[in-house]
Amino acid sequence: MKLDNISQFRFYAVIDGRWKGEEELVDISLLDFPERLKNDQKAFEVFAKILLLKYINVTSNGGLVIPSGTKKINSYLSIELERFEEEIRIRGDVRQNYYNLILRICNDAADTVPFLKQKIRGLEDQNRLLQIEVKKLIEMLEKVEMIKESFRIPFDAIEDLLISFDKDGNVLVVNEASREWFGQSPSNIVRKRYKTILKQDILYTIRQVSDSKKPLIIEETIDDRLLQISYIPTTNRKNGQMEVVMVVQDVTKRKLAKDEGLLRGRNEGVSIMGGTIRHILNSSLNAILGFAQLALSSYEWPKSTMIKYLKLIERTALRMKNEIASIADQKEYRITNYIDVPETRLSSFFMLTEFIGNFYIKDFICLSINSMAYS
């Protein structure tokens, strides 16, 4: 029987009122049966008879029990009563009761199969769309991994130790420098909580920085190494939680280089200052010596000229004193530009030769050299 080709069929049955069994089934015929299944009509009539016998029950006293609704025969077949009529037939002096029934057989599988096929097609379409989405997600994930890797490379290239903590002190991220600093890989450190790291009370410091939201810089000496430990508060843009980044730098070499630079600078300053003082003393003393020798020469100078030379000697000595005091007051070395003292140039000396008269040539040369040195 081609039950897959038909969703339902109806049939007409006549039952003798003296129902005692199958033999009282007087007549059964199909109603509105499809023409395409005419060759299977007999088989359907036999099938309808079998289902009818399953539908009707007989009581112990020979009564007929007919369900008022639909009765399920198996997982996909059901039979339903559409009409029930009682008919009285008289044959001679015998009065007999007959029951006319119109029933309908429903093939749920016939309706279910197309429905299931439709559902399967829908699921297949969804599956294809999901496969496309999965492919796109995989491509996006690969891009994210590439971006993540591009960020990791410079992060791990930093020799300084970088550790990110949450507010509870759990390690969120650490760079590859952890291998050199602790002898452990980042995977062995992440998602763990430490009480102390490099002599630092981690939880206390993290909470302090998180509450103040201000960076904190600490210097710690460990095993002859000077470490600069910086705590930097940051905000996670994804969850809005406060995190603290710990940056540990070994500044021992930098500190030594700085101290050596300061010492070298001091030494250079002392050398330059010594040269400056030497220049001041030499130039001033040479000027004083020149004017003194000029005043002490055998020539009898006029009193006004002698007073002028003495004033020049005094001015030069005061200048030397002020320069030395100025250098002593300097907190850092500054280059000093020197200016000429008036009336001390060589040309001024030649203007004075009108008072010299018969002046010895050796005194003239000595005075010239001393005046040039002073200038």
Image (cartoon, rainbow, N blue to C red):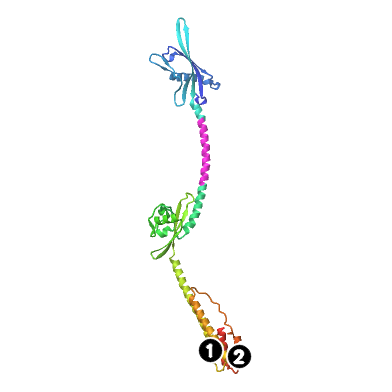
Q: At 50% from the left edge and 55% from the top edge, which residue is drawn? A: 151
Earlier along the polypeptide chain: callout 2 or callout 1?
1
Question: Which one is nearer the viewer's eye here, 313 or 237?
Answer: 313
Determine whether the residue tagged by mark 2 lies in a helix, strand or loop: helix
Q: Circles 2 and 1: CB distance less than 8 Å? A: no
Residue 57 vertical placement versus 95 (above, below):
below
**Up-down relation of residue 296 to residue 326 (above or below):** below
Q: Which of 174 and 255 lies nearest the eye of the viewer?
A: 255
| Magenta stretch bounds | 115-138
Q: Position of residue 161 (x, y in %)?
A: 44, 59
**Label 2 amino acid?**
Thr
Q: Quadrant of residue 173?
A: bottom left
Question: Which quadrant: the C terminus?
Answer: bottom right
- Left or right, 358 with respect to 81, comes to right
Tell me the residue that label 2 is attached to.
353
Write down the residue under mark 1.
292
Q: Secondary structure at mark 1?
A: helix
Few, some or many residues within 10 Å of mark 2 (<14, 14–19, 20+)? few
* Residue 55 placement, left or right of 335: left
Say which of 337 and 75 sits in front. 337
Give residue 211's position: percent from left, percent from top: 44, 54
Q: Residue 282 placed where, x, y %?
A: 52, 83
